[in-house]
Image (tube, rainbow, N blue to C red):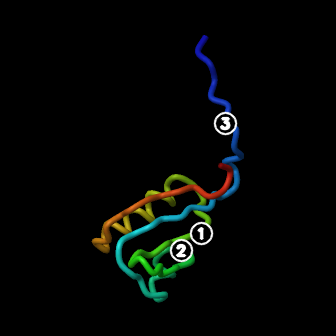
Amino acid sequence: MPAQFKPEKDFSQPLIYQIRVQGHLGNQWADRFDGMTISREADGTTLLTGPLADQAALFGALRKVRDLGLPLLSVNCLVGQ
């Protein structure tokens, strides 16, 4: 019998993600990114930080980054590491 997947993290709660893109986004884009916090960094990048309900929400946010033509630099899960 194959081993069952037993996650070490509680995936029933939204996880906090940080998405880094090249360029600066204005705060007016926060609604488009479901209220994620927008932080413009001195190195010319933008951090989008906030809870995403599930993998579908994460992929939705990444699709928005793609649709805006923003170069994606990194995606990190900040909670449950």
Hey, which residue is sitting farthest left in the picture?
69
- Across and down, in percent, residue 62 comes to 41, 62
Which residue type carries mark 3? Pro
Which residue type carries mark 2? Asp
- Residue under the image location 62 percent in, 18 percent down: 3
Report the front residue among 41 and 26: 41
Which residue type carries mark 1? Gly
Earlier in the chain: of badge 2 and badge 1, it is: 2
Q: Is residue 45 above or below residue 74?
A: below
Earlier in the chain: of badge 1 and badge 3, it is: 3
- The residue where tag 1 is placed is 50
Q: Is residue 36 left or right of residue 72?
A: right
Earlier in the chain: of badge 3 and badge 2, it is: 3
- Residue under the image location 31 percent in, 74 percent down: 68
- The residue where tag 3 is placed is 7
Marks 3 and 1: in contact by CB < 8 Å?
no
Hey, which residue is sitting farthest front in the picture?
43
Q: Is residue 20 left or right of residue 37?
A: left
Tell me the tag on residue 34: 2
- Across and down, in percent, residue 64 comes to 38, 69
- Check disc 1 and report its element: helix, strand or loop: strand
- Check disc 3 and report its element: helix, strand or loop: loop
Distance, label 2 to label 1, CA atoms, is 9 Å
